Amino acid sequence: MSVVTLTINDKLVSAQAGQSLLSAIKDQGIDIPTLCCLEGLTDWGGCRLCMVEVVGSPRLVASCVTPVAEGMVIQTESQRLTAYRKMIVELLLSERNHICASCVMNGGCELQSVAAKLGVDHVRYDYLCPDLPMDASHERNVMDPNRCILCTRCVRVCDQVEGAHTLDVMGRGIQQRVIAGLNQAWGTSRSCTKCGKCVQVCPTGALFKKGATAAEMEKQHDFLIWILDGREKKIWRWS
């Protein structure tokens, strides 16, 4: 595989051709906020938090879906980027019900963590809170679209890792939400294997185990790499 050379934050680095810009940036130990991106799933570019500045381009680009290129010059931190990232988090917080004090993922929520890191201490936009119906029909898990940020991690893991494709997205705008089957009660979906992968990859409290408290609801994202390493590389780590 060929190697390309690019500049990230004034440092000359090398990356594999075809590698995503986000991956190359992370290889340099640089932390960039993301919510829709998760190692083991295909990149989607939905949340836009990982956007960076590319010298010569008037627009910001989502680094997870932008491949590296020879001679590319990248800035991952600037006042402009911080302002846009804060605005994105504020819009996510204002779109639905993200009242942390009453959420089972309080203290373990990725949206909450990103907001804290960016210094989002208030929201400048009107709260919409569309009051979408919860689905507690599943015997093990609960789906609360009012806390969903539509990152589609659950949809992708259900399709790409579990192979069930029970979950999908329906609707547009503020009414858009994740559904099970053909918009049926989750508990009645015959394709759901009850594996719980969707719950584990959800970054917020939109999917959680039934009856779990905030202290008990800890999500483990690293199981994806464990599964994929086993399937693709025949490497199984039992401890």
Image (spheres, rainbow, N blue to C red):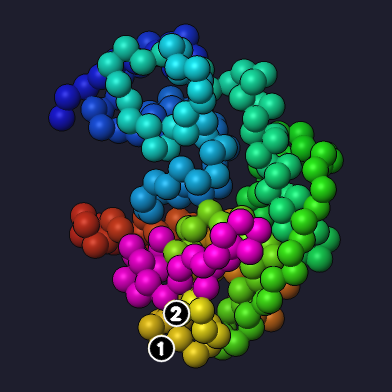
Question: At 55% across and 65% down in the image, what residue appears?
Answer: 171
Q: Residues within 10 Å of mark 2 (few under 14, many from 20)?
A: some
Answer with left or right where residue 179 lies relative to residue 142: left
Task: Tell me where residue 215 appears, x and y as whole percent.
Answer: 72, 66
Region in magenta: 156-179
Residue 26, quarter of picture: top left
Q: Which residue is mark 2?
A: 181
Name which residue lies at 38% across and 83% down: 191
Task: Residue at 58%, 21% (x, y): give it.
Answer: 77
Q: Closer to the camera, 183 or 145?
A: 183
Q: Tell me the amino acid under the disc marked 1.
A: Arg
**Residue 163 visible in the snapshot:** yes
- Secondary structure beneath dot 1 equals loop
Q: Which badge, 1 or 2, is on the more N-terminal residue? A: 2
- Tally of numbered discs: 2
Quadrant that contains the N terminus = top left
Question: Can you identify the residue that label 1 sits on?
Answer: 190
The reply to whether the magenta stretch includes residue 146 is no
Image x and y of residue 32, in percent: 54, 33
In this picture, residue 98 sits left or right of residue 52: right
